[in-house]
Image (tube, coloured by chain):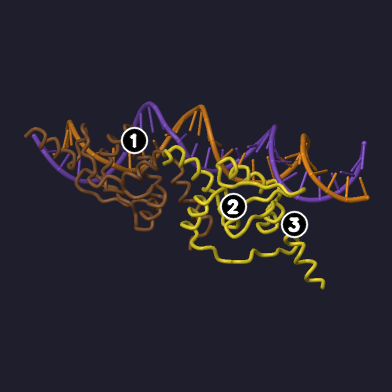
Chain colours: A brown, B yellow, C orange, D purple
Amino acid sequence: MSSYEELAVRFKALAHPVRLQILDMLRSDEACVCHMETALGKRQAYISQQLMVLREAGLVDTRKDGLQVFYCLADDITATLLDAIFGPVEEERPARLEGCSCPRCAVSVLESVS
Amino acid sequence: MSSYEELAVRFKALAHPVRLQILDMLRSDEACVCHMETALGKRQAYISQQLMVLREAGLVDTRKDGLQVFYCLADDITATLLDAIFGPVEEERPARLEGCSCPRCAVSVLESVS
DNA sequence: CCTTTATATTCACAAAGACGAATGCAGTTT
DNA sequence: AAACTGCATTCGTCTTTGTGAATATAAAGG
């Protein structure tokens, strides 16, 4: 069991609209920073700052692939907590974003050309 | 459904160890301020300050009885959220505290004399 | 190697939060 | 109508957080 102190630390990280939006997004799939940047319409540095907070709170994990860093929820406990907050995950297939150059979205660009 | 902004407001209120402890306490039963004061070993004004935050976040409700003000969880949604955080409520009967002069605890004083 | 790309970090300042101390205020008792 | 009791609020100070701007770093490609 976590102490009240430890719990408070995690909630502090949750107590921010942009960070909540990021976490909600990560429920359906992992995402690289540039994808979130496009999805949220915020500066890259700003997104990275919020991700740093989430990382330090142990809410997300990272995976490096070439130049990109993919973020995902840290564990099942986190995912379960988020489900309790947001309800069940809505969209099954993560959105491909226009103007996003990450691998996942680049596919859609190629497809749209063909 | 709440917006990220609205959710963040509620989490901000949760992101504090003493407030979490108060909420945890209220899960098993309502409590007056003097009771919490004794239970948490903090100054009365300090407790009231934290209660104000919880009130403004819509997490607790109040009931006035003579000189005392009893606090309880605001609604079932709040209670459910807290259960998700803390797990099931542990103690069935709320503790009677020595050195607490609220009606509930005063009973125990009378009983201990007889 | 030099550039470019994707991401991270640092800095600075405004804004908000934490909390002790002091004070206000409503309801009760005498 | 004092005086007391239980609680709430205000104030001041210190610490923390939020966020824009600038800068750093690491991986890839030429």
Instruction: Look at 72% across and 60% down and name the residue there.
Output: B104
On the image, the x and y values in percent for residue B71 come to 64, 50
Give residue B102's mark: 3
**Disc 1: CA contacts within 10 A as few (<14), some (14-19) or many (>=20):** few
Q: Amino acid at mark 3?
A: Cys
Is B11 placed left or right of B19 in the picture? Answer: left
For the residues labelled 3 and 1, say whether their Cβ atoms are less than 8 Å apart. no
Q: Nearer the viewer, mark 3 or mark 1?
A: 3
Judge left or right: residue B32 versus residue B10: right
Q: At 35% across and 54% down in the image, what residue appears? A: A79
Q: Please, what secondary structure does the residue beneath circle 2 have?
A: helix
The residue mark sitting in front, 2 or 1, is 2
Q: Which residue is mark 1?
A: A45
Three-letter residue code for mark 2: Val
Q: Is residue A55 above or below residue B92?
A: above
Q: CA distance from mark 2 to mark 1?
A: 33 Å
Category of crowding for the residue at label 3, using alpha-carbon neighbours closer than 10 angstroms: few (below 14), some (14–19), many (at least 20): some
The residue carrying mark 2 is B18
Q: Are marks 3 and 1 on the same chain?
A: no
